[in-house]
Image (cartoon, grey):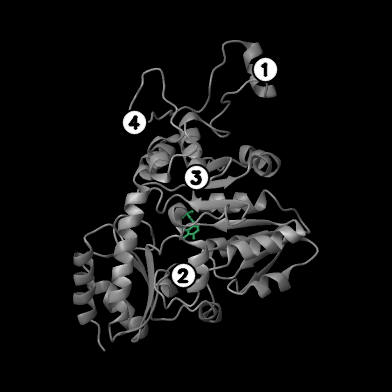
Amino acid sequence: MSKTWRPATQLVHGGTLRSQYGETSEAIYLTQGFVYDTSEAAEARFKGETEGFIYARYGSPTNDMFEKRMCALEGAEEARSTASGMAAVTAAILCQVKAGDHIVAARALFGSCRWVVETLAPKYGIECTLVDGRNLENWEKAIRPNTKVFFLESPTNPTLEVVDIAGVAKLANQIGAKVVVDNVFATPIFQKPLELGAHIVVYSATKHIDGQGRSLGGVILSDKQWVDENLQDYYRHTGPAMSPFTAWTLLKGIETLPLRVKQQTQNAAKIADFLAEQGKVAKVIYPGRKDHPQADIIAKQMTGGSTLVCFELKGGKDAAFALQNALEIVKISNNLGDSKSLITHPATTTHKNLTDEARAELGISPGTVRLSAGIEDTDDLIEDFAQALAKVSA
Ligand SMILES: Cc1ncc(COP(=O)(O)O)c(C=O)c1O
């Protein structure tokens, strides 16, 4: 396999493990275990003297293809596939900390990610400080002698704030801490956290990687040493492994990732520009627009806009609900990254567990709406928004 292949080629051919039958489409190896020709062969496999699979909780051929393909795309040495994005986030963080350690995380995180660092980790004696991640000084001020992990998502869910990944990585390297980046919103097409200096990247593969609303999945990517020293045992013994069937759907999903992300981004950009012109819309936040408050950082670390648009309606919750209810093509769903356009009202769904104060800190108001643009025809989507906005009271 060529390491110089560009992403679109890697995503169709990377990591392929063709069986003796020479199948075109990757095979699904739905097996829990593997057999050995002799007792000696089993012993050698367990001792690590020979290469090969042992048990599907540790790894299996279809998952291996998915992991290798993700490594090729991300520029990582090793990957482990997980049953969900949350399994990936939890494993990536918990496998490398112990009681007495300290995590610094951006406060603008997906709700479950925030629960892991803010609520779960302290139960095991791991301290956590949440900061406004937009400002590097806040990361620096939060550092303690026991800080081991920095955790962030960029752009954030739902208000599309960005964090200077290279800046956070520089701070982490000064104290020997590791940076974990949840790269879901950026997608591996538009942002490469490892190249920016981050140490570990996690994805909810449920989102753009599957992209067609079928499977829950996740993946953790890093260098071999970090995986060997931190993740390997945690992964094998706590069992967050992905089903081989899911790995197969995701292998099919990533073949078309660049095509889908390109069309979704084109749709998102056009809808963002359309919404910005509408009198009932108070504000549009879109990483591809020049008026994004952190356009300079976006230009430095992302190669494309986003498939997501965040906007605020002047009429608050009533207007947000009326708009969502009036849309015909765009469906109401808290999921994202799908080939179908999906819209959600974060204050009453994904971020409903936060206090009013915490929501206000993140810029989530009663009128805030998050759109995940799909791959439908751009003009149909704009017309759908136009007819739905006409039904929203001024
Ligand atoms: C930014 C982000 N991280 C992690 C997750 C968790 O992924 P999953 O639902 O696959 O567990 C999600 C969405 O659910 C998300 O939006």
Q: Secondary structure at mark 2?
A: loop
Residue 77 at x, y percent in the picture:
59, 40
Q: Is mark 1 within 8 Å of ligand 1?
A: no
Q: Secondary structure at mark 4?
A: loop
Q: Is residue 224 left or right of residue 265?
A: right
Q: Which residue carries the number 4 mark? A: 25
Residue 317 at x, y percent in the picture:
36, 81
Label 2 is placed on what type of residue? Leu
Q: Tag 1 or tag 3, which sits nearer the N-term?
A: 1
Closest to the camera, between mark 1 and mark 4, is 4
Q: Nearer the viewer, residue 354 or 225?
A: 225
Label 3 is placed on what type of residue? Ala
Label 4 is placed on what type of residue? Ser
Tell me which corner region of the image, top left, top right, bottom left or bottom right, holds residue 285: bottom left
Question: Distance between the Cα atoms at labels 4 and 3?
Answer: 22 Å
Question: Distance between the Cα atoms at labels 1 and 4?
Answer: 33 Å
Q: Is residue 112 left or right of residue 319?
A: right
Residues at marks 2 and 4 touching, judged by CB atoms closer than 8 Å: no
Q: Secondary structure at mark 3?
A: loop
Q: Nearer the viewer, residue 265 or 27?
A: 265
Question: Distance between the Cα atoms at labels 3 and 2?
Answer: 26 Å
Q: Tag 4 or tag 1, which sits nearer the N-term?
A: 4
> Extreme top residue here?
38
Q: Which residue carries the number 1 mark? A: 43
Closest to the camera, between mark 4 and mark 3, is 4
| Mark drawn on residue 160 | 2
Residue 36 at x, y percent in the picture:
57, 15
Mark 4 is surrounded, within 10 Å at the Cα level, by few (under 14), some (14 to 19) or many (20 or more) other residues, namely few
Question: Distance between the Cα atoms at labels 2 and 4?
Answer: 36 Å
Q: Which residue carries the number 3 mark? A: 83
